[in-house]
């Protein structure tokens, strides 16, 4: 065998059950991914579903979780064997999801592969995941994920190069078969992009004037990005970024920046020692948590506030083309779009549905209630970007987060909002609950529950205005005559059993009623959600496992 030109092997394999990508790629227990051929089958299914990538660039990186390094080597050798010309990989196998998106776009790559199970825990007993992104830098649309799944069901072999492992820790180029492998700094391109969007000088001046930040990278992928940007470039004091070292098991924590798994930040923000801004991101760096002194900002409110203030930020001074949100996200952003006279789009859950709207220039900013927000600078949600948006707006407005939120509610009204998750329930029960709700849908309009009257009820279907594709059964919506909503859907990112998500929203225009405790303000709707769906009966649960 010629050492400088290693051999391409064709390895015989058999399909694994259920390699169907979910809301955001294929996500399974790490032990499932560690089975011989499991990852390789899926990677081959990706490549076999694509056309015309010969000689082109592929971007590759992951969130650094357990099994990341092994997986990177497998993907590298398969990408080379399948005919990619160049594979650009983040040093150490690291790239946050938004950074991968930025690199795909900057390098005009054919696509990219991101290894991550996002906010799911990592480690040998945790989860692992993989997703394919297309040349716009965004998650593959359903047409491609369906083709990948179809291929995985009939796969008979995959191609891989026999070679020693590539050194991932030294930037530079090596040859792998006919392909070039380029190890790059995972932060550089992303940092440059952030610099083009934000007024770093104004933010740095705010820090010099004593502004304080606590950003928790949750021992996940954003540590290197946050250190380089917040501490080194913007001058936030040392220690502003905590848990900055990406660890294979995220330090044993759950890298989900919500009020449950980042409760210490909420406690800090509510204490006398509160910094001006507390923030966090998730395993792969695409989610954000924003808490001002004594003021948590719900992701739905954050989207609305970012949209209303975007014109204050350098990269968005020309205004927004439009705003998009996932269907379950509160309608706070709709009120802003209406006032600005710009388009508002409602899409199914998952970032892949924003890609066409962004590519077509219909929208500039997008968001989801699940702590995701971003703009047309990439085609993924972006945690560090959201924090920079807030920092830039705070630097311009010179008000506190709490003041900005309160003034927003006073101007637009407040959308009380909460999500109740019932995690790891039996799939049969969850499916039965949804089936029985679907059956009831046609006769719900006009009926009343307590003081609540249902105006309309449906199973959300999305007609993509750009490519005409239709996505059905994307969540059950119950709309009340006072504008309140209940939405039910099953999660597409879990790895054991089913997770039922119930989203509850009430609009309150009266500023005198903007100080209620959220769960209290929604109590009658929560009771109605139980009655309508018979959650207890179908799942055996009397209470949600997580309330956000
Ligand atoms: C969840 C969220 C969804 C998000 C997805 C991926 O999906 O609800 O809004 O896009 O996770 O986020 P689901 O199907 O479990 O509800 V990430 O940060 O895990 O890539
Ligand atoms: Co994520």
Image (spheres, rainbow, N blue to C red):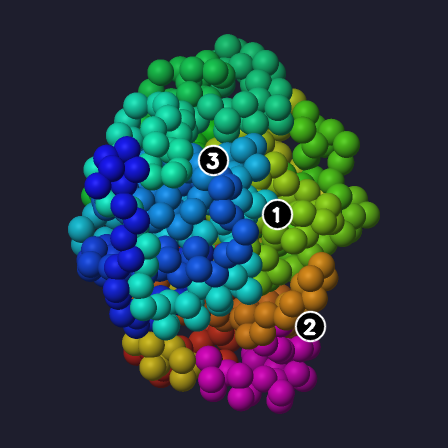
Which one is in front, 252 or 411? 252
The residue drawn where x is 42% and y is 52% is: 131
For the C terminus, the image quarter is: bottom left
Q: Is residue 458 magenta?
A: yes
Give the secondary structure at mark 1. strand
Per the image, the residue denoted by label 1 is 366
33 w.r.t. 533: above or below: above
* Mark toward the start of the polypeptide (2 vs 1): 1
Any mark on residue 99, and which?
Answer: 3
Residue 369 x, y percent position in the rendering = 52, 53
For the view shown, which residue lies furthest in the front direction? 1
Disc 3 to disc 1, C-alpha distance: 17 Å
Per the image, the residue denoted by label 2 is 481
The nearer-to-camera label among 3 and 1 is: 3
The residue drawn where x is 40% and y is 25% is: 185
Give the secondary structure at mark 2. loop
Which stretch appears magenta? 434-461
89 w.r.t. 433: above or below: above
The answer to whether mark 2 and mark 3 are in CB contact below 8 A is no
The residue drawn where x is 40% and y is 84% is: 432
Q: Is residue 45 visible?
A: yes
């Amino acid at each position: 065998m010629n050492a400088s030109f290693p051999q391409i092997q064709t390895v015989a394999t058999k399909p694994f059950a259920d390699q169907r990508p979910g809301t955001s790629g294929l996500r399974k227990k790490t032990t499932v991914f560690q089975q011989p051929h499991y990852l390789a089958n899926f990677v081959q299914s990706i490549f076999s579903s694509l056309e015309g990538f010969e000689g082109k660039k592929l971007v590759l990186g992951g969130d650094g979780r357990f099994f990341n390094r092994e997986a990177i080597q497998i993907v590298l050798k398969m990408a080379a064997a399948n005919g990619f010309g160049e594979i650009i990989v983040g040093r150490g196998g690291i790239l946050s999801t938004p950074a991968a998106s930025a690199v795909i776009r900057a390098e005009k790559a054919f696509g990219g592969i991101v290894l991550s199970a996002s906010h799911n825990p990592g480690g040998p007993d945790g989860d692992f995941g993989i997703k394919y992104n297309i040349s716009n830098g965004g998650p593959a649309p359903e047409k491609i994920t369906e083709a990948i799944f179809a291929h995985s069901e009939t796969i008979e072999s995959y191609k891989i190069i026999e070679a020693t492992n590539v050194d991932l820790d030294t930037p530079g180029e090596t040859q792998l078969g006919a392909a070039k492998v380029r190890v790059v700094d995972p932060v550089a391109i992303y940092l440059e992009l952030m610099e083009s969007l934000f007024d770093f000088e104004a933010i740095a001046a705010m820090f010099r004037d004593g502004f304080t930040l606590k950003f928790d990278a949750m021992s996940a992928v954003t540590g290197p990005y946050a250190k380089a940007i917040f501490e080194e470039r913007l001058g936030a004091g040392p220690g502003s970024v905590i848990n900055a070292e990406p660890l294979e098991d995220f330090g044993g924590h759950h890298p989900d920046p919500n009020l449950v798994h980042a409760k210490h930040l909420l406690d800090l923000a509510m204490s006398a020692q509160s910094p001006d801004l507390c923030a966090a991101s998730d395993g792969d760096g695409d989610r954000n948590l924003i808490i001002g002194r004594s003021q948590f900002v719900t992701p739905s409110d954050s989207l609305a506030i970012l949209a209303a203030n975007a014109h204050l930020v350098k990269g968005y001074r020309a205004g927004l083309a439009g705003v998009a949100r996932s269907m379950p996200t509160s309608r706070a952003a709709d009120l802003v779009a209406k006032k600005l006279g710009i388009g508002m789009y409602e899409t199914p859950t998952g970032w892949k549905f924003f890609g066409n709207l962004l590519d077509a220039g219909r929208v500039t900013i997008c968001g989801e209630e699940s702590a995701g927000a971003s703009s047309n600078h990439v085609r993924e949600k972006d945690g560090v970007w959201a924090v920079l948006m807030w920092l830039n707006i705070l630097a311009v407005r010179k008000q506190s987060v709490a003041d900005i939120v309160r003034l927003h509610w006073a101007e637009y009204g407040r959308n009380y909002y909460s999500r109740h998750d019932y995690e790891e329930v039996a799939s049969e029960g969850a499916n039965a609950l949804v089936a029985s709700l679907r059956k009831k849908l046609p006769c719900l309009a006009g009926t009343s529950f307590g003081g609540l009257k249902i105006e309309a009820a449906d199973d959300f279907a999305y007609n993509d205005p750009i490519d005409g594709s239709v996505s059905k059964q994307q969540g059950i919506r119950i709309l009340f005559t006072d504008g309140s909503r209940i939405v039910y859907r099953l999660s597409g990112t879990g790895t054991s059993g089913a997770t039922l998500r119930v989203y509850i929203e009430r609009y309150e225009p009266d500023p005198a009623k903007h100080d209620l405790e959220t769960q209290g303000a929604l109590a009658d709707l929560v009771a109605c959600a139980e009655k309508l769906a018979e959650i207890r009966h179908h799942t055996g649960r009397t209470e949600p496992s997580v309330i956000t």
